[in-house]
Amino acid sequence: MLAAGAIAQTGGVKGKVKNRNGDGIAGASVTIRKDGKDLKTGRADAKGNFEITGVRTGMYNVVFDADGYTAGALFDVEIKDGHTRDLGDNLILYVDLGTQIIIRGHVFSRDGFVIPGAKVDMYVRKGDSAFKKVVSSHSNSDGEFGFRHDQKGVNTVRIVVKYNGVTGTKDIPIDIAAVYRTEISLEYPEAKDKD
């Protein structure tokens, strides 16, 4: 209990949590921490902006995180009486690869030659729902392609490759967030022998 006439000295912090592309992260969690204890937590708005007030003056650590991202922290942040300290808009979180499906693959001809420039589409399925196309790319000069997607709820990835009117498809069962490697051979019709 405060002595008569004593007033608790409080301040706060504000800022913006973003991803590495500069987009605000909606719902990011921001926690004021001291001596390993969480004292006050706030949430970022739809644009990644947050403000936490009513924190006693002193030195704190500020931890910020969001689903699918690695946590970030600022150490020894001073909060002063009557002031809301602006932490700026460079509170950047990076995708947690531990939550990602990473697909790496090659496109080959039936004869074993790499196929550069093939169109490669990635579809995902969650539960019993239909496959949904999420991204497209092309195989590089070595016939390689790669995709990354959040693992949450995904049970199957379908890779569809198209090149010169020929299509190849491969379904990859997904158990956990991990790197999955695959190869797709495109079967070209055999030339007819002339007799």
Image: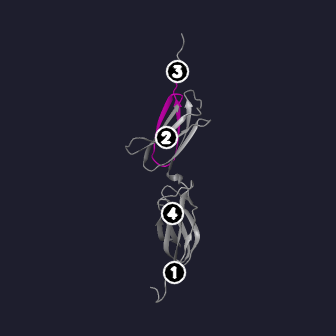
Q: Earlier in the sequence, mark 1 or mark 4?
A: 1
Amino acid type at mark 2: Met
- For label 4, the crowd category at 10 Å Cα-Cα, with few meaning under 14, some 14 to 19 and many 20 or more, is many
Residue identifier under label 3: 190
Q: Secondary structure at mark 4?
A: strand
Between the residue at mark 4 and the residue at mark 3, the CA separation in whole angstroms equals 60 Å
Question: Is 180 colored magenta in this rendering?
Answer: yes
Q: Earlier in the sequence, mark 2 or mark 3?
A: 2
Q: Are marks 2 and 1 in contact (CB under 8 Å)?
A: no
Nearer the observer, disc 1 or disc 3? Answer: 1
- For label 1, the crowd category at 10 Å Cα-Cα, with few meaning under 14, some 14 to 19 and many 20 or more, is some
Between the residue at mark 1 and the residue at mark 3, the CA separation in whole angstroms equals 82 Å
Residue identifier under label 4: 49
Q: Secondary structure at mark 1?
A: loop
Q: Earlier in the sequence, mark 2 or mark 1?
A: 1
Between the residue at mark 2 and the residue at mark 4, the CA separation in whole angstroms equals 33 Å
Residue identifier under label 1: 9
Pinpoint residue 43: horizontal percent, then vertical percent.
Answer: 47, 64
Between the residue at mark 2 and the residue at mark 3, the CA separation in whole angstroms equals 28 Å
Question: Which residues make up the magenta segment?
Answer: 163-190
Amino acid type at mark 3: Glu
Does residue 163 appear in this view? yes
Between the residue at mark 2 and the residue at mark 1, the CA separation in whole angstroms equals 55 Å
State the residue in front, 16 or 120: 16
The dominant secondary structure in magenta is strand
Res. 122 mark: 2
